[in-house]
Amino acid sequence: MFAGGYAGGTVGRRKSNLPSENLQIPKPAGASGVRKSSSSSSGGKMLSMTYSESIRSGISRYHSDQGLNQTPRHTDQAELQRLREQRIAAQIKNMEDFLKMNGLAMEECVSYQTGMKYRNLGKSGLRVSCLGLGTWVTFGGQITDEIAEQLMTLAYENGINLFDTAEVYAAGKAEMVLGNIIKKKGWRRSSLVITTKIFWGGKAETERGLSRKHIIEGLKASLERLQLEYVDVVFANRPDPNTPMEETVRAMTHVINQGMAMYWGTSRWSPMEIMVSHKMWKEAFSPVSAPGMRTRWASAQGVVGNSSVLSMWRPSPL
């Protein structure tokens, strides 16, 4: 359901002569593989690991070691394997050093306990679990609130941090159930990535679409149902041919600048529609040098600049 990029264009990435590695930390014998559902200080340790396990944070000192970032043009497979092992060892050492500086240990980190993999959402810095839990045709309707809580708890305790909903799901009840569970469990907000979608909010003509009025009012209503101050990503649930693209882009930028959302994105938009919105954003905001106006955004499908990201979703069998 998700893909991403910067509205201001593509961002250069550090080039490496070695194939990218998905770092796997070995577990000790007896590791449970499930993290405890606790709102204590362990949450801070989870976040620290999420930061420290990223490739970018773990590679800086590796590249500073002379020779490790140099790959001969003609290298056999054995030499490539040796270089890969050196790279992984350097990354693990950097993680351990980071954790020790903060009085932490790998055994207390989410990815270590659960084995869940995390990735950046598109080109943003937002780290999300490779699996997410949605609420369509489940929460607030087809299943009881008790079962919804059990499902969400099982997902959270196994490393899933991405939870998706929408204002239209069960006529808003899905957002209410999701918000009630988060409040009841006492999970730290910073350990969650909550996304919602705006388009169908009510029966009135002004309660649907992607006008500035409905984006702002609809997101406020969603936040009230979720009992949250902000969502991490707000999606335009589909294109709106009745609203100028510039109005939608400006409204989404406004809710981000107001702290109601961290990012905005699209769902079921065509590549051309995404490119038009990107062009509108550049024309409206590129002359402004303030960092706060360089809004990051995520797109559910399509192409942003020269970047293309493919994601999958599957309806619940329940």
Image (cartoon, helix red, strand yellow):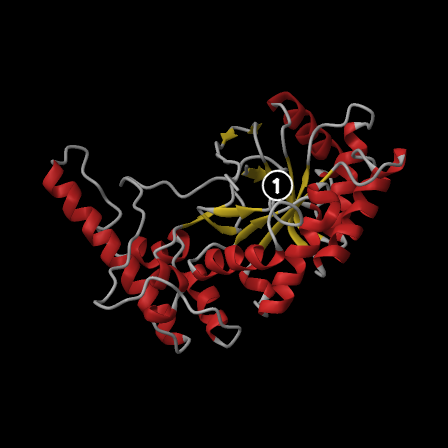
Foreground of the two, 112 or 31: 31
Q: Position of residue 242 (x, y in %)?
A: 83, 25
Left or right placement of residue 211 versus residue 117 in this view: right
Q: Position of residue 108 (x, y in %)?
A: 37, 71
Q: Position of residue 47 (x, y in %)?
A: 48, 65
Foreground of the two, 216 or 283: 216
Task: Please identify the quarter of the rendering in which residue 104 is found.
Answer: bottom left
Residue 158 visible in rendering = yes
**Mark 1 lies on residue:** 137
> Is residue 242 placed above or below 195 in the rendered structure?
above
Q: Position of residue 246 (x, y in %)?
A: 78, 31
Residue 167 visible in rendering = no
Rendered residue at 60%/64% (across/down)? 189
Q: Quadrant of the N terminus?
A: top right
So how many labels did they put on this image? 1
> Is residue 270 placed above or below 22 in the rendered structure?
above
Rendered residue at 50%/47% (across/down)? 132
Considering every residue shown, the one lying at the far top of the view is 272
Task: Please identify the quarter of the rendering in which residue 7 is found.
Answer: top right
> Is residue 296 placed above or below 45 in the rendered structure?
above
> Is residue 42 placed above or below 308 in the rendered structure?
below
Left or right placement of residue 84 versus residue 251 in this view: left
Q: Residues within 10 Å of mark 1 (few under 14, many from 20)?
A: some
Name the residue type under label 1: Val
Foreground of the two, 263 or 18: 263
Rendered residue at 82%/28% (across/down)? 243
Tag 1, which secondary structure?
A: loop
